Amino acid sequence: MNPCRLPLLLVLASCSALSARRESAFFDVRAEDDRLAVAVESALRGLPARAAPARPVPIEARWSDTACSDGLTSSAGVRLSVDPHAGPDRLRFLVAHELAHYDLPPRARRLLPGVVQEGLADLAALRAVPALRDERLETYRLATLAVEPARLAEVVRLDGPSAAKLCADEYLAYTAAGVELAERVERAGPATLERLMARAEAEGLALVPLAWFD
């Protein structure tokens, strides 16, 4: 299992009060305490400018009991489990990643393979926090080398919830494959995702096939 995901689920299932709050036209942050609220607000301020949403993005943040930070995102908002020892760049990376998931339109969440969605989110975070890019890419490389090619071919076909249960190397290799696919989409042009989704809908497919990203 992704070593951060179980602690995240336990934290989010807890009843710890969200006693601190920071609000703006863009975000509504509720956090376990004022220190965490300030940290999340600072991470948000360090991200590239965003268009004002129809309503502030709801963000809930709690401290993690482990040396892991992670997040879960849905159309209802963003939920964070934050390592108390995480530096500002790592928290900013996590927030950027989860906001990229949040910003995906419902149609894209429905039609794009999980690995592509994960890749788009991590690519957005890499660009938002360039100080972590080299370290993150090296982590991707080492994790991918640790996974047998036949196993990786299976892994990349998993949806997001299933991928969250992978071991650390497999999850990172999954993300690395997603980033590569996301970069291919970008190189092909801004209309590529729309074209692929429209084709899948026209052919009555539940998902855009991974083979179409080659």
Image (cartoon, rainbow, N blue to C red):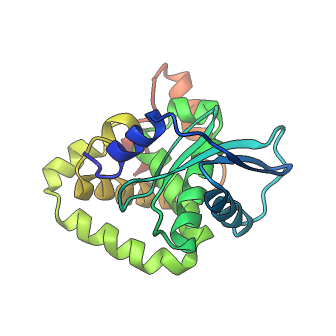
- Left or right for 214, reference 82: left
Query: Residue 47 at what x, y percent from top left?
Result: 69, 66
Q: Can residue 102 be seen from the camera position used here?
A: yes
The quadrant holding residue 78 is: top right
Q: Residue at x 36, y 60 (%)?
A: 176
Query: Number of numbered discs present?
Result: 0
Q: Is residue 58 above or below residue 202?
A: below
- Left or right for 21, reference 164: right
Q: Residue at x 38, y 55 (%)?
A: 175
Q: Is residue 82 above or below residue 161?
A: below
Query: Residue 40 at what x, y percent from top left?
Result: 64, 59
Query: Residue 168 at what x, y percent from top left?
Result: 26, 56
Q: Nearer the viewer, residue 69 or 112?
A: 69
Q: Is residue 79 above or below residue 125?
A: above
Q: Residue at x 81, y 44 (%)?
A: 53
- Left or right for 166, reference 44: left
Query: Residue 130 at what x, y percent from top left?
Result: 56, 77
Q: Can residue 185 be seen from the camera position used here?
A: no
The residue sitting at the top extreme is: 204
On-image quarter of the N terminus: top left
Q: Nearer the viewer, residue 131 or 152?
A: 131
